[in-house]
Amino acid sequence: MDAQLCFALHDAARAIIGRYRPLLAIIGLTYTQYAVLLVLWQRPTISLQELCGAVNMDSATLSPLLKRLADAALVERLRRPGDEREVEVRLTAAGSALHEPARRVQAEVERATGLNRPDLEALRDQLHTLARQLRSAPGDEAG
């Protein structure tokens, strides 16, 4: 099993998310809420469809999470002007205020990896490339 790429990636993902969880809990966020807010800190207003693409979640998964973020007054969900069918997600002042504490969480997790900045960036880039390649690779679509 140790020779399998899938196990190594799964193990690393669990370990890094496990590092984030307690630190994010201190600022009142789950890891998936943090992932959504990462997008919103870059784009404070975004369509639900674009947000789904950015975090690689479908709307059925993302909608309950957004409801919890809205209940916590961290985001607003609005109908887009000019097209009532489209939902827009907007960061609130309270959501924006979590950006700096979340940066400290990120810095702590980065320190915990023991990797320097260039190695962290190289690893991140390799993982993004791997994910893109796997998503675009031909395969048995029937499952």
Image (cartoon, rainbow, N blue to C red):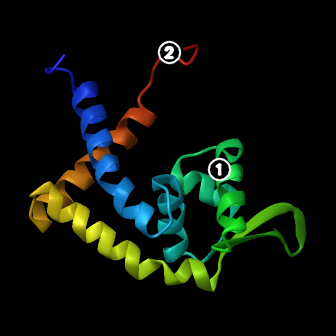
Q: In which quadrant will I find the C terminus?
A: top right
> Residue 27 bears which disc, if any?
none
User: Viewer-proximal residue, 55 or 68?
Assistant: 68
| Residue 94 screen position, x and y as percent | 59, 82
Q: Quadrant of residue 133?
A: top left
> Residue 62 bears which disc, if any?
1
Label 1: state its secondary structure: helix
> Residue 140 bears which disc, if any?
2
Q: Residue at x 16, y 64 (%)?
A: 111
Q: In which quadrant will I find the N terminus?
A: top left
Q: Residues within 10 Å of mark 2 (few under 14, many from 20)?
A: few
Label 2: state its secondary structure: loop
| Residue 126 screen position, x and y as percent | 23, 48
Q: Amino acid at mark 2?
A: Asp
Q: Nearer the viewer, mark 2 or mark 1?
A: 1
Q: Amino acid at mark 1?
A: Leu
First in sequence: mark 2 vs mark 1: 1
Q: Residue at x 61, y 86 (%)?
A: 93
| Residue 55 screen position, x and y as percent | 52, 53
Q: Is residue 67 left or right of residue 11?
A: right
Q: Residues within 10 Å of mark 1 (few under 14, many from 20)?
A: some
Residue 128 visible to an observer of this rendering = no
Q: Quadrant of residue 69?
A: bottom right
Q: CA distance from mark 2 to mark 1?
A: 27 Å
Q: Residue at x 35, y 62 (%)?
A: 23
User: Viewer-proximal residue, 140 or 68?
Assistant: 68
Relative height, residue 2 to residue 74 (above, below): above
Q: Quadrant of residue 4?
A: top left
Q: Residue at x 29, y 53 (%)?
A: 19
